Amino acid sequence: MEIIQSFIYSVSRVKLGLYEQRILLKVIEHAQVVLKGKLVKNMLFRMEHDLDNVKIDLPVRYIMSDGSKHYELIKDAARTLMGRRFEFYDSATKGWYSSPLIYNVAYVQGSGLLSFYVSKMLFDVALDFTKGFCKYDLETALNLSNPHAVRLYALLSGQTKPLIYPIDELKKMFGVEDKYSQTRDFILKIIEPAKKCLDEANCNTFEYNRIRKGNKVIQLQFIPKRVRQETAEELAAKISMRRLVDQEILIVMISYMGFTTKELSAHKVLLNEYCKLPFAQDNIYQIERRFRKKKKSKGYVIAAIRSEVDAWKAIQNTSPETKTK
């Protein structure tokens, strides 16, 4: 699933661990509902939204995609995020803003859900495209094992031209400005492991050049590198899914039920019919709750959707109003 987030959010100054990063990826995914049907390309604007201090219920299995069973790490990540503040400066309004990343966190053992609230301010920044935006694949980002790789992947994946950043700004962006006094150590400990992670993941990655002033490295030039081009069939499948299936339903099925885009493409005709039901968006959440509570398979989900479509068709075929039209 393609994610769109603001450039301002992408370069925000905050130190994040791996699970903290993944939790925030799911927050950005939640914000995608606002973009449904909106054309973002080549537009610099601030997206209006009604996401005011939103509660999010997040299945922990989507954070722990590495197969770990140490759920206490999720609680530790949540505690850390509650203690971290998201800060940014709006040069247009001369305003400084600060807010906890998440708050009012709850995790009930055995529920499989991490619940928390996200402030309106974070969504304001994530949907502020006045400085541009970044595009990247959510599933790829969630499966990366290095938090710095996640940030660089999000920042560079959709770029076509090199980006240059001062070393000091990069250190602040990663929250390590007080840790590495030597630039070579920063590159060795932060940039190189992130690049290695992206290279090994066989996803969009980067090359980089050191820019010097005298003997001192003062900037890094990041050169986006597309490792793998999508095949015509994959591209067509992605485009057709966007056209045929409601984005909110896609988000629920991919993020909360574990479907891949490829799996859903095999049922795109059925899903298109399902999206035409007037109650489809509410109904998909009911199916998701049953799926999670009863620990059903993905086959159960498809069968439930097919049952809803068949039942609706039966009602329409027997309706007197339908027959008189």
Image (cartoon, rainbow, N blue to C red):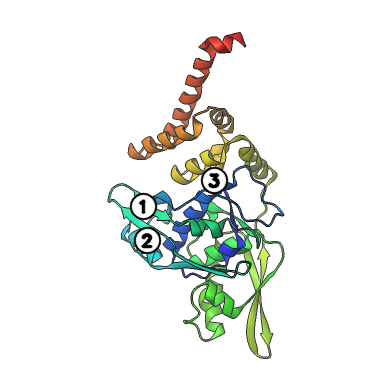
Which of the two discs, 1 and 2, labels the residue nearer the N terminus?
Answer: 2
Q: What residue type is labelled 2?
A: Ala
In-image side of 193 versus 69 (left or right): right
Q: Can residue 95 be seen in this view?
A: yes
Q: What residue would you read off at disc 2?
A: 78
For disc 2, the neighbor class at 10 Å (few under 14, some 14 to 19, many from 20) is many
Q: What element carries label 1?
A: strand
Residue kind at label 1, given as amino acid type: Leu
Residue 36, horizontal then vertical, whole percent: 59, 43
The residue that appears at 58% across and 9% down in the rendered structure is 323
Query: Contact (CB < 8 A) between labels 1 and 2?
Result: yes
Spot occupied by residue 166 in the image (x, y as percentages of width and height): 62, 78
**Which circle's residue, 3 or 1, is located before the other in the chain?**
3
Quadrant for the C terminus, please.
Answer: top right
Regarding mark 2 in the picture, which secondary structure is present there?
helix
- The residues tagged by marks 1 and 2 sit, at their Cα atoms, a distance apart of 9 Å
Q: State the image coordinates of residue 138 (x, y, percent, origin top left).
A: 54, 53
Residue annotated with mark 1? 114
| Circle count | 3
Res. 64 visible in picture: no
- Displayed quadrant of residue 304: top left
- Give amino acid for label 3: Val
Instruction: Give the alpha-carbon distance from disc 3 to disc 1, as whole Å.
Output: 20 Å
C-alpha separation, residue under disc 2 versus residue under disc 3: 23 Å
Residue assigned mark 3 = 33
**Circles 3 and 1 in contact, beta carbons < 8 Å:** no
